[in-house]
Image (cartoon, rainbow, N blue to C red):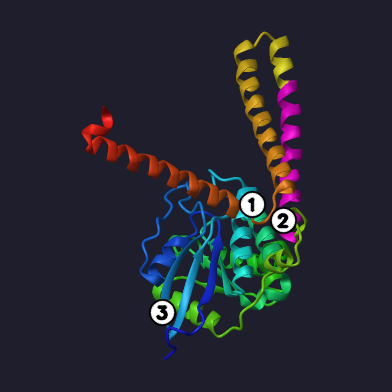
Amino acid sequence: MAGSSAPIQFIAVMGLTGTGKTTFINAMSGASLETSSGLKSCTKHIATAAMILGGHQVCLIDSPGFDDADMKDTEILKEIASGLDHMNRKNLQLTGLIYFHNISHVRFGKTALRNVRLFRALVGDKNMQNVVLVSTRWDIAQNDNQEVVNQRIAQLESEEDFWGGMIRAGARHEKLQNIKYDGMRILEGLLRKPTTEVQLQSQLRQSLSLSNTTAGQVLQEELKKIQDEHKKEISFLQTEIEESRRAGQVADADLMNKERQKVEKEQERLQQALIDLKNYEIGQRDHEIEMRNREIEMKNEEIRGLKKKLSNPCCLM
C-alpha cells in the first residue's frame, strides 16, 4: 500500500451544470461540497476533495461548467487556466479527466456543443487516453423508450461534434448507473494511466496568452457566434417595433423594445468579456486574490483595534 509520500493523483471532473459532478465527488470522497439544484450552479470556483483509493492519494477537482447562470464563460476559462498555471508552478499534472453528460436530455443543444468544443480544446486530442466521458441520470432515462435512448448514445458516440471525435482520439464512454460501483471502476481505470499535460496547461507553460491558446480561440469563436445571433435578433425586433408602432400597437412595441434593450445589454456584456479575455494575463487572478485577502486582513485588523478600544474605557476619552 502506498504511503503518505506517494504522489497525489489529480482527476478533474467537468461538464454542464446539473449533470451530477459534485454529487459524484461527494459520494466518492465523503466530502460535502455544495451541490446545485435546478438551473443554478453551486460550483463558482474550483473546489477539491481528497480520498484514498487502492493505496493512491487522489484529489478530485470540481470545476464550473461553461453554462453557469452567474458566471461568464470567460471567467470560467480564467478560473480553469489559473488552476492549471498553479499546477505548472508546482510541476503537477492531471492523471485523468471525467466529463459528465445528462443522458436524459433529449437534445444535444448549443450549450452542450459549446461545452464539448471547449473541453476538447482544453484537453487536446493527444491526451484523450486520459479522458472518460460519463453519461449520468440513468434513473431518469430508464423511464424513456430504451430504443430511443440507445439511438441517443449511438449518436453521441459517433458524431464528430459530440463525443465521436474524442472517442476516436482515445477517450472512452462509461455509464454511471450505480454511483459507488461505477464510480470506483471509472476512477480505478484512470489511476492506471500515466499523468498527462493537457493542451491548455502546455500552452500556458509556453507563455501563450490565454486568448491565444486553443481553448481561448474556441471560446472567442463561440462568443462571436452568439453576438451574430444577437445582431439578427436586434434587427428583427427593431423591424417588429416599427411595424407595431405604425399599426398603433403601442403596448406591443413597448414590450418588444424592452426585449431589444435586454439583448443589447447582453451584447455589450459579451463584447466586454471578449475584451477582458484578450487583456487577461495569467497570474492576474492570483494577484487579485492576494489583494482581496490583504483587504480582508486590513479590515480584520481595524475590527480588532476597535474591539480593543471598546474593551478599554480609557481609550474612549
The residue segment tinted magenta is 214-239
User: Closer to us: mark 2 or mark 3?
Assistant: 2
* Magenta region includes residue 235: yes
By secondary structure, the bulk of the magenta-drawn segment is best described as helix
User: Closer to us: mark 2 or mark 1?
Assistant: 1
Q: Is residue 248 left or right of residue 67?
A: right
How many angstroms separate mark 2 from mark 3 (CA)? 34 Å
What kind of residue is marked 2?
Leu
Residue on which the image places disc 1: 284
Residue found 23% across the figure and 37% down from its top: 312
In the image shown, does 237 or 34 lie closer to the viewer?
34
Q: Are marks 2 and 3 in contact (CB under 8 Å)?
A: no
| Residue 197, image quadrant | bottom right
In the image shown, does 226 or 276 lie closer to the viewer?
276
State whether residue 11 is above or below residue 251: below
Residue on which the image places disc 2: 210
Label 1 sits on a secondary structure element that is helix
Q: Position of residue 196 (x, y in %)?
A: 65, 77
In the image shown, does 242 or 128 lie closer to the viewer?
128
| Residue 101, image quadrant | bottom right
What kind of residue is marked 3?
Ile
Residue found 76% across the figure and 67% down from its top: 206
What kind of residue is marked 1?
Gln
Label 2 sits on a secondary structure element that is helix
Comes first in the chain, label 3 or label 1: 3
Residue on which the image places disc 3: 52
Comes first in the chain, label 2 or label 3: 3
Label 3 sits on a secondary structure element that is strand
